[in-house]
Image: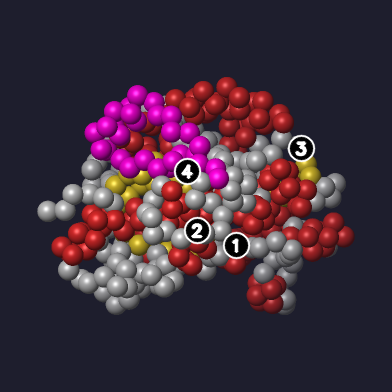
Amino acid sequence: MQRSIFQNRLRRAEQELGFNFSEEVESENQDEEEPKDITGKVAGVVHSKDVRDSTKETSQYPKWSTVFDENDIFCNNEGYSFQTYFKKPILQDGDTPIVFIGHHGAGSSGLTFGELCKSVVSNTRDGYISKPGFFTFDFRGHSMTNLLNADDEGNYRMDIDTLVGDFKFIIDHFLAKFKDRYSSKIHLFIIGHSLGGSVAIKLLRDHQFDDVKGLVIVDIVEETAIHSLDAMDSYLNKLPKSFQTLEMAINWYVNHGLINNSQSAKLSIPSLLKHNQNGSWEFIVDLRKSKPYWNDWFKGISNDFVTLPNRISKLLVLANNDYLDKPLIIGQMQGKYQLMVFYSDTNLSNFLTTSTTVISDSMKIGHFIHEDVPNKFTKALLQFVERNDLSFRRNDESNSQLQLINKLNAKWNAHKK
C-alpha cells in the first residue's frame, strides 16, 4: 500500500515535469486496476499530446540517473516527502567512507550539485584510494519534493527552524540507512549553497553530529545576504512567467549570467520547471510565498559559523568578491576557518598549487560557483578534505600519519616540525 502511494505520487510528479514514469513500475502494474491516490481518487494518467511532446523534450537532457545511483524518497513523521539523490562511495577494505551532503539554496534543486558530483567521481578515479559518495535532496517546496507534496500547504512553510528540522531529519535518516547497509563508520562533509549554507550552519550550531567532520559554505556572507533581500522582489518580478521550451529556459539562465556553464544548466534547470496545461514550462516553486520568512533566513549566520566547534573544519567559498562582514573578518584573523575566493578568468593554478594543471571549466563565475566551475571547485574541495581528514588517502601515500601530515603541511606551506 505504502509503495503504491509513493508510485502514484511519483507518477503525478513526473507527469508535471514531463517525464515518463519508469518502465519497471509500468510493467509491474500492467495487470493491476487503475491507480488511485491516497484519497481513493483515480490518479489520472494523462496521455495527451502535450505530455508526449514534453516527454520527448525532456529526453534530450541528462537525468538524475546520469549522475546518481539512487533517488529515494524520505518521508518524515508528518507525512511530508523529500526527494533525495545518492552517489555511493567506492571503498577499499577498512577505509572510512567519506560522503558529501549538499543542501541547495532557494529556488534551486538538488541537481544543482550534479556536475560537482560527476567531477568528484572523475577527479578521485585515479589519485585516491577511496572514492567519496555524494548525497543531496530537493528541500521543502522545491522541485520533485514540491510535486510529491503537491496539495500540501507545508510546501511553503519555509521558516528557518522548519528548514533546519528538515535537514536534521534528512541527515539522521540518511545515516541510519547508510550504517545499516554499508558501514558503521562514516565521515560527512556538508556543502551548503546560499540559503542551504545558512541552514547547515544553524543545524550544526544547535545539534551535534559526531560523523560531520567538515562544513563548506558557498557564496554567502550574512551582511551581503541580508542586503540582497531588498532586491528579491525585483529579481522575482523579472523572472519570466513561463518558457515555451526547456531550451529557452536554459538559454535564459545562461544568457543572464545566472549559470555560466551550459552543461550544468542542462541538468539543473529542467528540474526547476514543470509542464503546464498550456504546453509551456513554468517554475515549480513560487518563492514569493516564502517572503514572510526571508528576514530570518540569514540572521546571525556569520557569528554562528565562526563559533562552531573546532572539531568541524570550515571552508568559506566566495565568487569574485572577498568582502567579509565583521564576525568573518575577526574569525579569519583568528584562523577559525579557511577562505577561498574564485575569480572569473582565473586558472585554479593561480591560487592553489603550482602543480595544478589547467582544466576545462567556465571562464565566468557567478553565484552558482559549484555549477560554473565544478572541476576547479572539486580540486579545492578535495584538498580541503585531504587536509582535514587523515582517512582520505592518495594512492602514493604511506600509512604513516607523520609522513602524511608532513606532505600536507608542505602542500599548504605550513611549518613542519
Pointer 2: residues within 10 angstroms few (<14), some, or many (20+)?
few
Amino acid type indicated by mark 2: Val
Q: Are marks 1 and 4 in contact (CB under 8 Å)?
A: no
Residue 132 or residue 417, whichever sits in front: 417
Q: In this rendering, does residue 325 appear at all?
A: yes
Q: Residue 17: image x %, image y %?
A: 71, 55
**Of marks 2 and 3, which one's residue comes earlier in the chain?**
3
Report how far apart the C-alphas of labels 1 and 4 lie in the structure: 27 Å
- Up/down of 352 relative to 121, above or below: above
Amino acid type indicated by mark 3: Lys
The residue that appears at 73% across and 70% down in the rendered structure is: 33
Report how far apart the C-alphas of labels 2 and 3 lie in the structure: 40 Å
Amino acid type indicated by mark 4: Phe
Q: Residue 227: image x %, image y %?
A: 51, 23
Q: For the residue labelled by badge 1, is the local secondary structure a helix, a strand or a loop?
A: helix
According to the picture, the residue beneath numbered tag 1 turns out to be 64
Pointer 3: residues within 10 angstroms few (<14), some, or many (20+)?
few
Q: Which residues are magenta?
A: 317-345
Task: State which mark lies toward you, 2 or 3.
Answer: 2
**Of marks 1 and 4, which one's residue comes earlier in the chain?**
1
Task: State which mark lies toward you, 2 or 1.
Answer: 2
The residue that appears at 40% across and 43% down in the rendered structure is: 340
According to the picture, the residue beneath numbered tag 2 turns out to be 358
**Colour pattern:** secondary structure
According to the picture, the residue beneath numbered tag 4 turns out to be 342
Q: Residue 296: image x %, image y %?
A: 46, 27
According to the picture, the residue beneath numbered tag 3 turns out to be 241
Q: Residue 346: image x %, image y %?
A: 51, 46
Q: For the residue labelled by badge 3, is the local secondary structure a helix, a strand or a loop?
A: loop
Q: For the residue labelled by badge 2, is the local secondary structure a helix, a strand or a loop?
A: loop
| Residue 228 among those drawn in magenta | no
